[in-house]
Image: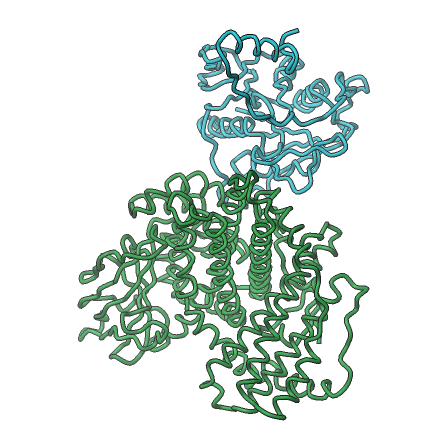
Chain colours: A green, B cyan
Amino acid sequence: MATEAGQLAKGGAFLIETTSEQNVFTPEDFTQEHLMIADTTRAFVEGEVIPNAERLEHQDWDLTVQLLRKAGELGLLAADVPEAYEGLGADKVTSALITENITRGGSFALSHGAHVGIGSLPIVFFGNEQQKQKYLPKLATGEWIAAYALTEPGSGSDALGAKTTAKLSADGKFYVLNGTKQFITNSAFADLFVVYAKIDGEKFSAFIVERGYEGVSTGPEEKKMGIKASSTRQLILEDVHVPVENLLGEPGRGHVIAFNILNIGRYKLAVGCVGGMKAAIEAAVSYAKTRKQFQTEIANFPLIQQKIADMNIRAFVTESMCYRSTGEIDKQLHGIDDHTDGQTVAKAIAEYALECSVQKVYASEALDFVVDETVQIHGGMGFIQEYPAERMYRDSRINRIFEGTNEINRLLIPDMLLRKAMKGELPLLQAAQGLQQELMGMLPQPDTAELLGEETHLLEMAKKTFLFVGGTAVQKYMQSLKDEQEILADLADIVIEIYALESALLRAKKTAARGKSADLQVAMVQVYAREAFARIEAKARNILAAMEEGDVLRTQLAILRKLTKFQPVNAKVQKRAIAREVIEAGKYLA
Amino acid sequence: MNIIVLLKQTFDTEERISVENGKVKEDGVRFVINPYDEYAVEEAIRLKEANDGTVTVVSIGPSRTEEAIRTALAMGADEAVLADDPALFGDEFTAAKVLAAIIRPRAYDLIIGGNQAVDDGSGQVAVRLAEELGIPHISTVTKLTLEGNQLTAHRDAEGDVEVVTATLPALVTAQQGLNEPRYPSLIGIRKASKKPLTHVTAADLGLSSEDLEPRTEVTEVFLPKPKEAGRILSGDLSEQVKELVQSLRSVDKVVG
């Protein structure tokens, strides 16, 4: 099965389908308007945020609010708000570009992201007409700042285990909220909180809580490892009277809002990581070009070049993946006439919940890798606060924790796949059965005449490998597979590697098809494909060894070997060439 | 009040310049509005906001120039004219002829250009244009006020300030410090794509081949020599002086 240009891909379908490069959105497809909006965002960050970095890091909240308002004047808070409520109703690529570019200004991006994303979107998607009219214009302009309160001291990953309660008042006019919310971004200055509480201790629901309501207060500022320019406190609710009209969505349906907002939070987090990686690469390359040891700039040493090439490749793959799925979401939304009906929009995004989890995990780990190497390239100076590398390193770490820990997201990936398969939305099991037949015969050979033919073949084999080990695991464990968390995480890793590799591969092919020079992209894919493939093979072997032993294992490993044959490339030479270009440009290149 | 802004698209000032086959390489380079022209755009929009009227951006350059023009439109200019016919590309002399031919039939009160373009830095086009149109010009302006049809400009005269007045129609060129250009807002960007942009060709302008014949020729393009490490002279004073004079004569040939 193949998807062609213009056709909508189902979430998760990339695992069993061949996608045409013409059917993926890539950063080379940005319109002039997209690029101009990215420029404005960048100009705002470079002109207003970066010069104030020190004050922001020291938590000058007045300045944070002032800058958010300024961002509001420029329209940088309005992308996801429909035009009917003084927003821009822009496509998701636009809002992703804003997120990516804001990240260049350090953790001010968290204040921005929490406001436009998890703070405002619950109302955009699930607010009723009256709520939207009342709050969205204020949020789109930055007159009011929003925050999102889901986590509690006793419930993090187990979000539905919240203890905050809501009780309808005797006169039926108010819900009385009591409880404590934890780690609330923007809490020092937010005017509005989207708060989850259980009505009568049972029905998990969302409420719009204004700061001015009596009984709303915040705890002291948390002393964090990183993202210090963002405010993080507890939100304390003591007999807060929330008018019944501020119930968001239906009573007992809060989980629908929470999960949808998490999907969006995840893909936005990934896009933010792309911006963080690009900034880190610039910092690392610039340092490597000026720091001299043994009478030469350290950028001239192959081991430093290797790091720079790896960093650039990781950013390239993440960027390809993020904009592919953002473009996919836009295509889904394009089919919807009425964008004011937020629930339809949220549903379109939910189609790609799997991809959202995939890129959250990949991007946060890629950023951690890149900032780690940035510190390493800085040597001792990477450990000193004078250079931005130190802050980048600390700021990155939280990304693997919030918006669902990477562990939770890894467990979600196979879980979502199986659900889709069981519901008949995705013919995964049929594909796995079909593979059994194929494995008996001759496997296809790479088309070496085609551009990136070998890598395309590797991708195909990777998908077969996933079906093979995944299918075997499902057969073996059936319902109890959910208890085999180690196997699930390994399976998730294979899925993540496949989506990442495919996104980068299709992007390079599309660039070449455009007639533009794709040499750098092609080189990056050639190197990356083999590294990813080796990781996939290792995970697959791990999974098989965890399930079987003796002759059965030996037979399965033989099949795996058949699937995972490949020719290496001279990565040493390729990476030197990639690094040379990045070093010359002084920045991330694709 | 009708204001015309002269705009050129140039390399981003942070771009590295590299020369290949006697030409500056443009591949993968980021282009921007010439920073001095950006002050001109901003000033024009501020005057428009204070006095009503229209701002028209006029530019000569290849089709990529449209990006810079759209940015100016997003900032708040109303319409634009782009001479993107290669027959219209030449030097400062031809540029002034082309701009004059575009502007002459239009109603205008004020023309604002940048003091110079950051790429070739000639600083000639705008003042040549004023001559072509027979209107007064004030260059390197750091402050501009308007009362009726009287213009008062502060101009940067090599570090001093000259206060000059003129009667409209007139032309001024913007110097750094004139204003702080705004960022185009997202709403502005969205509106920009719907604002009129007219393309003109040599045929539209009816210029003679004489007018389009450049008066200058670029004979060679090269990068400045990389700066070499300095040298600290040693020995007693008279020896140092002797060595310095010797170096200036022979090594660096500063003194003949």
- Compared to residue A509, the image places residue B141 above or below, namely above
Q: Is residue A419 left or right of residue B199?
A: left
**Picture mark count:** 0
Where, quadrant-wise, is the N terminus of chain A in this rendering?
A: bottom right
- Position of residue B85 measured from the top left corner of the image (x, y, whole percent): 75, 32
- Position of residue A63 measured from the top left corner of the image (x, y, whole percent): 32, 43
Q: Which residue sits at x=67%, y=70%?
A: A459
Q: Which residue lies most toward the bottom here?
A: A551
Q: Which residue sits at x=45%, y=69%?
A: A406
Question: Which of the two residues, B249 or A121, is positioned nearer the viewer here?
Answer: B249
- Position of residue A447 measured from the top left corner of the image (x, y, whole percent): 79, 69
Question: Which of the two residues, A99 or A171, is positioned nearer the viewer here?
Answer: A99
Q: Quadrant of residue A509?
A: bottom right
Question: Which of the two residues, B212 or A457, is positioned nearer the viewer here?
Answer: A457
- Position of residue B207 measured from the top left corner of the image (x, y, whole percent): 77, 21
Q: Which residue lies most toward the front here?
A: B235
- Compared to residue A557, the image places residue B256 above or below, namely above
Q: Which residue sits at x=59%, y=26%?
A: B227
- Compared to residue A320, the image places residue A382 above or below, namely above
Question: Which of the two residues, B56 or A289, is positioned nearer the viewer here?
Answer: A289
Q: Is residue A556 left or right of residue A235?
A: right
Q: Which residue sits at x=50%, y=14%?
A: B235
- Compared to residue B50, the image places residue B249 above or below, namely above
